Image (cartoon, rainbow, N blue to C red):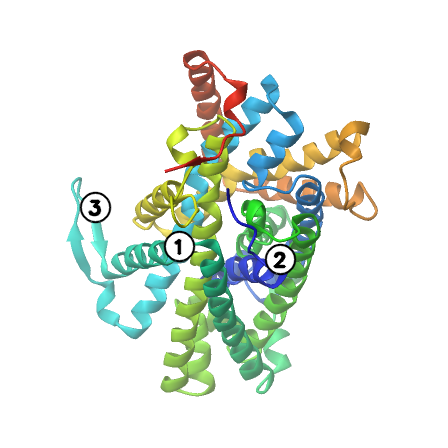
């Protein structure tokens, strides 16, 4: 049995650690490019609105059905072993097996990039793989970061939870330094230095705004992270909704203030061209020593995010195995530490492979493959629960003003999906179609045994 050792404070730390990783420090330049100036800040606001609305969806589901696995657990609790339920669960695991590790890989890639600010030689090729793929020093550092944090997560959950608080503390110091440094030398004129085309709304505006919101939502991902560890959370029906909503609100405020702080010191045209925006910001503000210091703190923050992701995402294959939807071996827990060690190692290995791909490819792939089956699917599930009295009675937490927040979240996710590049949309749809074919093959080749779902295996 998994142990309930994650406290409310640790739950918030896991969520915020995943949200405020290296993401905003590597995506701000691309974010500014989407709308060509500081007016792109509207993307942060829209993204925050969608994240808060979607956080209410997660809160309803997590409070009603607390358990490990997040979306997989929600689908299993609501749809059980129905044909529709089996398909949803299978497709979620299918997309997660590459979208989850890709999200983790994006954080590791950020670690590699900021490491190159300290050691410029990391930009040089260090390894040539079969097939002609060249690995540079930044990718090697990213891979080593994954290996090191998997080793840290390979222990009892109460120990991992305490480590998460230490890493979370480093994250708060990082963003605090940037915010204070910016607000104490803030120049409002830099934020009002808009390009001539800033006020125009033409045929391209929706796609530009969609690209900005997509980056913002990528940076917000993680407000629900502790839901993947529900079986290990103290008083989950109370702790999970609070952790979700507190994390989303606090990080939304942090991002907004941090972006304003940076753009009030570093002109946006310079920021757009920066590869290490936080380091360049501190270099402008205080000089090389400060830039080196903030780079070290960002690496700490990135490690906190990556650690939170590895810790929670390793529970997905474990939960899938326990519901009879994945290989039984992944449902095992460590004989002494009582954590899902095999799932942890598999997710770590897949994340390691993701470090070999460009960051933009990684971000686009993980979002398009995840939106329909996870975020849109969960919103539909909330409406389904509300229509069934026997399920509606389980709702210990109910979003205010229902269905408005759910509809806002739905419109937001579909807006991001619909304004993505056509080839990326095709990739997302094709991955789900392939998952449907894989499900048809899997369902014919394996007989379902209802008695398998609830067993806890050790060894």
> Observer-nearest residue: 378 or 456?
456
Q: Earlier in the sequence, mark 2 or mark 1?
A: 2
Q: How many marks overall?
A: 3
Disc 2 from disc 3: Cα separation: 35 Å
Residue drawn at the location 51% of the way across and 66% of the way down: 165
Q: Is residue 111 left or right of residue 74?
A: left
Query: Disc 1 or disc 3, which is closer to the eye?
Result: 1
- Tell whether label 3 touches label 1 (CB within 8 Å): no
Q: Residues within 10 Å of mark 3 (few under 14, many from 20)?
A: few
Q: Earlier in the sequence, mark 1 or mark 3?
A: 3
Residue drawn at the location 75% of the way across and 31% of the way down: 391
> Observer-nearest residue: 364 or 249?
249
Q: Residue 333: x, y in percent?
A: 42, 41
Q: Residue 70: x, y in percent?
A: 57, 41
Disc 2 from disc 1: Cα separation: 39 Å
Q: Is residue 264 above or below residue 325?
A: below
Q: Is residue 140 above or below residue 172?
A: above
Badge 1 element: loop
Residue named by callout 2:
43
> Observer-nearest residue: 84 or 283?
84
Mark number, residue 133: 3
Mark number, residue 155: 1
């Amino acid at each position: 049995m998994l142990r309930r050792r994650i406290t409310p404070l640790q739950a918030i730390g896991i969520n915020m650690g995943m949200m405020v990783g290296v993401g905003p420090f590597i995506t701000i330049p691309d974010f500014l490019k989407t709308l060509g100036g500081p007016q792109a800040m509207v993307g942060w606001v829209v993204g925050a609105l969608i994240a808060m609305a979607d956080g209410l969806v997660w809160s309803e589901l997590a409070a009603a059905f607390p358990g490990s696995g997040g979306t997989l657990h929600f689908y299993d609790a609501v749809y059980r072993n129905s044909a529709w339920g089996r398909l949803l669960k299978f497709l979620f695991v299918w997309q997660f097996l590459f979208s989850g590790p890709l999200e983790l890989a994006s954080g590791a890639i950020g670690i590699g990039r900021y490491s190159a600010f300290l050691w410029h030689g990391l930009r040089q090729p260090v390894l040539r793989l079969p097939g002609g793929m060249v690995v540079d020093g930044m990718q090697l550092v990213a891979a080593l970061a994954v290996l090191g944090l998997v080793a840290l997560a390979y222990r009892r959950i109460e120990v991992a939870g305490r480590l998460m608080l230490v890493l979370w503390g480093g994250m708060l110091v990082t963003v605090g330094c940037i915010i204070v440094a910016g607000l104490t030398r803030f120049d409002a004129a830099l934020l009002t230095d808009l390009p001539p085309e800033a006020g125009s709304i033409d045929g391209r505006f929706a796609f530009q705004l969609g690209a900005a919101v997509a980056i913002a939502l990528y940076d917000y991902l993680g407000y629900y992270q502790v839901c993947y560890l529900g079986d290990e959370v103290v008083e989950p029906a109370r702790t999970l909704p609070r952790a979700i909503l507190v994390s989303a609100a606090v990080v939304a405020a942090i991002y907004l203030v941090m972006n304003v702080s940076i753009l009030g010191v570093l002109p946006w045209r310079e920021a757009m061209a920066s590869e290490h925006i936080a380091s360049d910001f501190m270099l402008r503000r205080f000089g090389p020593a400060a830039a080196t210091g903030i780079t070290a703190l960002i690496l700490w923050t990135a490690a906190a995010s990556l650690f939170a992701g590895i810790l929670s995402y390793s529970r997905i294959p474990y939960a899938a195995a326990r519901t009879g939807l994945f290989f039984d071996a992944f449902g095992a827990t460590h004989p002494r530490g009582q954590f899902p060690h095999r799932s942890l190692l598999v997710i770590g290995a897949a994340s390691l492979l993701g470090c070999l791909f460009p960051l933009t490819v990684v971000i686009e792939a993980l979002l398009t493959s995840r939106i329909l089956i996870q975020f849109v699917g969960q919103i539909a599930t909330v409406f389904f629960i509300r229509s069934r009295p026997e399920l509606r009675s389980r709702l210990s937490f109910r979003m205010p003003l229902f269905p408005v927040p759910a509809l806002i979240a739905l419109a937001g996710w579909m807006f991001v999906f619909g304004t993505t590049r056509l080839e990326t949309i095709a990739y997302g749809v094709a991955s789900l179609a392939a998952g449907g074919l894989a499900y048809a093959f899997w369902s014919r080749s394996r007989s379902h045994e209802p008695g398998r779902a609830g067993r806890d295996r050790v060894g």
